[in-house]
Image (cartoon, rainbow, N blue to C red):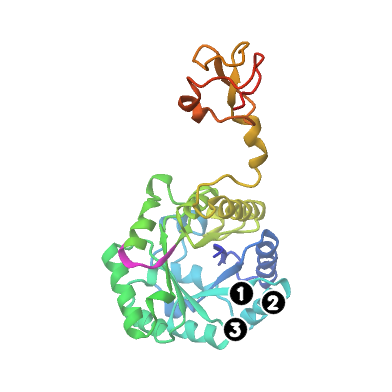
Amino acid sequence: MSVLIIAEAGVNHNSDISLARQLVDAAADAGADWVKFQTFVADKLVTIHAKKADYQNQTSDAGESQHAMIRKLELTREMHEVLIGHCKSREIQFFSTGFDPESIDLLVELGQDSFKIPSGEITNLPYLRHVGQYGKSVILSTGMATIDEIEAALNILEQAGTSRDCITVLHCNTEYPTPMIDVNLRAMLTIRDAFGVQVGYSDHTLGIEVAIAAVALGATVIEKHFTLDRNLPGPDHKASLEPEELKAMVVAIRNIEKAMGDGIKRPSASELKNKPIARKSLVAACVILEGEAFSENNLSVKRPGTGLSPMRWDEIIGRKAPRGFEADELIEL
């Protein structure tokens, strides 16, 4: 199964439909499978008193509240419809994270047949029940979560009607950007082994190497923020890939998929031609007369590997030469 690559446009559209369409184009051009936005209503998501994260203060107006910042980044239903249509024209799957039950319902009305649960909602019991009752496939992010919180969320989703087989759990760290020392990529394997689920990685590090490493470790889904320009205003641009970097990540992941192979150790078709050139054979170390016994003194091992295998050394030692051999001549029996 091919790794699902989700290009996370998120709120990097800055509520500009033209910019959002360009993000769809960039994701499609990069070869991503899905392009993901965020669906929310500020009044349902945060209070007017909610503070912003440190990284948000650094990348947006420190004097405005989280509510004010979020409100400027909403997508209307009409904008969703435009983006869904544009995704179809570019042959890339539209996807969005719904942050509240009403937003989840809207996405269902618009035809979305799977859900993304963001890290901040992993302890939101009524929200989890609402998602779970649809019985659709779910991608669950686990930033800031403990293993017990992940277990509780999985249980709620299952009890509400979503089979565990339909859930992919993403390891994640919600610091933007995530310091390398805090990535803890092996936690993805801990999640897989603890719950028997498909796992993936939602990457907030700078660069592309950690996402690629996650694929090598067994991630089935990779999610990565991208933007058209890291210098644009907004909370998430600074920690996002630019289009050429996104393209490089997709190419690298597809190469890693090919490189992982099937796990069976055997010569590949491409290297078989090198076998007789790189391996060695039993050869005469000097002139050997017919009837003379082969010995450590008159045998050697040299390329090419088109003659008797050196693995037969013990078998050949002491046997009589069936004919005379010149030095460097391949030994025959």
The residue pinned by badge 3 equals 77
Residue in front for this viewpoint, 317 or 52 = 317
Quadrant into which the C terminus falls: top right
| Residue occupying image coordinates x 64% and y 31% | 306
- What stretch of residues is rendered in magenta? 194-199
Q: Which image quadrant for residue 329?
A: top right
Give amino acid for label 1: Phe
How many callouts does the rendering have? 3
Mark 3 nearby-residue class (10 Å; few <14, some 14–19, many ≥20)? some
The residue pinned by badge 1 equals 94
Label ID, residue 88: 2
In this rendering, the label closer to the viewer, 3 or 2: 2
* Residue 298 on the magenta span: no
Give the distance between the C-alpha atoms of the residues marked 3 and 2, in whole angstroms. Answer: 17 Å
Give the distance between the C-alpha atoms of the residues marked 1 and 3, in whole angstroms. Answer: 14 Å
Residue reaching furthest to the left: 148
Where is residue 81? Give x, y as percent. 64, 82
| Residue occupying image coordinates x 34% and y 82% | 126
Q: Which image quadrant for residue 26?
A: bottom right
